[in-house]
Image (tube, rainbow, N blue to C red):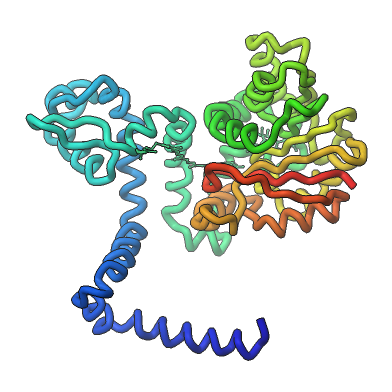
Amino acid sequence: MTGFWEDWLDRLRARRDRLIANPKFQRWSLANPLTRPIARRRARAALDLTAGFVYSQALFACARLKLFDALSDGPLTVAEIADRLALTEDAARRLLDAAASLDLAERRARGRYGLGQIGAAFLGNRAALALVEHQPILYNDLADPVALLRGEKRAALADYWPYSDLEQPKALQADQVAPYSALMAASQPMVAEEALDAYDVSRRKRLMDVGGGEGVFLCAAAARAPDLQLALVDLPAVADRARARFDAAGLTARAEVFGRDFLRDELPAGADLVTLIRIVHDQDDERALQLLRNIRRAVEKGATLLIVEAMSGVKGAEPLDAYYGFYTLAMGKGEPRRVGEIEALLREAGFGEFSLRPNALPTLTSILAAKAV
Ligand SMILES: CC(C)=CCC/C(C)=C/CC/C(C)=C/C=C/C(C)=C/C=C/C=C(C)/C=C/C=C(C)/C=C/C=C(C)/C=C/CC(C)(C)O
Ligand SMILES: C[S@@+](CC[C@H](N)C(=O)[O-])C[C@H]1O[C@@H](n2cnc3c(N)ncnc32)[C@H](O)[C@@H]1O
């Protein structure tokens, strides 16, 4: 678009903004039957933004008190729910009314409460519930978002993800990697299904998952591709957890595990498919490039690299910059990136022929395939 049209559009938007900011226009648009539906939607969006933290805490209370499990066999009375959740009846009713207003629970006949549609979705999604349960660390840090933005406060989330600012991450001990590794393992199945539905791994010989955590993704890939050889790279203390999982899954013979620093150590050769799942957005550009170049050195021309993580600007994933932007700010490293920004890093590292694979839930993850060129 030319500068003239951009300036013209900016002037038009400035008039629109002045109009929307005008309290008289706000009242008028709510009173007018033609504009009322739009005005109500925008007012509702403003309320949701204002109350969002409270909604999240109500959801957290439901998850922590296992409300969805309690309602899984059918509706119960307030007294029954209060008894199961170890709450007074007044407190249980307050929680249930909040949950009902958010579609997490539903009022039923004879004063009982059952699951709401979103509550039912959570009941069937342990991965999402695990993420909900770890949110308090983030929300404590976000109590003063301005201090975080100004760099005046070190967030506790940085200690939860201790690899993010270490020069020697291989020194991390079992107890330091356990909480984040368990969370990633619990939340991985959702992401794995999206990635494996979008990309057929069974056409490949050897899949290397770099920063593969406890190996949940590789276990899911193995189930879809019985002949696929598996390799996992992660820090030594995490690699130990992956070995234990592969042993328990009967995959010891198919899966090689490497306790390495993916930024500073040489990566194992031989993979024709490499995955980076929820990895690149943990790193600043310099380290992301270091990692991608390291992978490029380890693979032959023509090998495929899949970047699997939430990406900004993808249709359907609009609020992502808010969640991952502040999440990675509190972590102390990394940022959500647009597809084009990831492609630019990939190109610099020796990859090309990009294709963004369509997937069902871009709010959760996108899948970008690239070829070593
Ligand atoms: C007839 C039909 C079709 C429907 C009628 C009834 C109906 C509405 C049914 C719905 C059924 C349905 C399809 C339900 C699906 C529910 C799903 C898929 C729910 C998914 C929820 C996912 C959530 C809440 C995900 C949350 C993810 C979060 C918070 C991610 C956090 C990620 C973090 C912290 C990552 C950290 C990694 C790091 C460190 C940044 O690298
Ligand atoms: C956000 S987690 C993602 C784990 C897994 N891919 C998933 O999606 O569940 C990031 C992973 O990268 C690993 N990691 C971080 N820095 C690393 C490094 N320098 N070398 C090897 N692994 C590293 C962490 O131990 C962790 O398992």
Q: Residue at x 61, y 51 (%)?
A: 311
| Quadrant in which the N terminus is drawn | bottom right
Is residue 359 at all visible to an observer of this figure?
yes
Q: Measured from the top left, where is residue 3 in percent x and y?
A: 66, 87
Q: Quadrant of residue 169?
A: top right
Relative to 189, residue 290 above or below: below
Relative to 354, residue 200 above or below: above
Taking the view exactly as shown, the residue that stands out farthest to the left is 110
Q: In this rendering, would 49 be left or right of 363?
A: left
Q: Residue at x 23, y 46 (%)?
A: 101
Q: In this rendering, would 228 be left or right of 108?
A: right
Q: Quadrant of residue 90?
A: top left
Q: Measured from the top left, where is residue 31 in percent x and y?
A: 19, 76
Relative to 182, residue 25 above or below: below
Q: Quadrant of residue 185?
A: top right
Q: In this rendering, would 355 be left or right of 61?
A: right
Q: Residue at x 46, y 31 (%)?
A: 130
Pick the front one: 209 or 138: 209
Q: Measured from the top left, where is residue 88 in percent x and y?
A: 15, 30
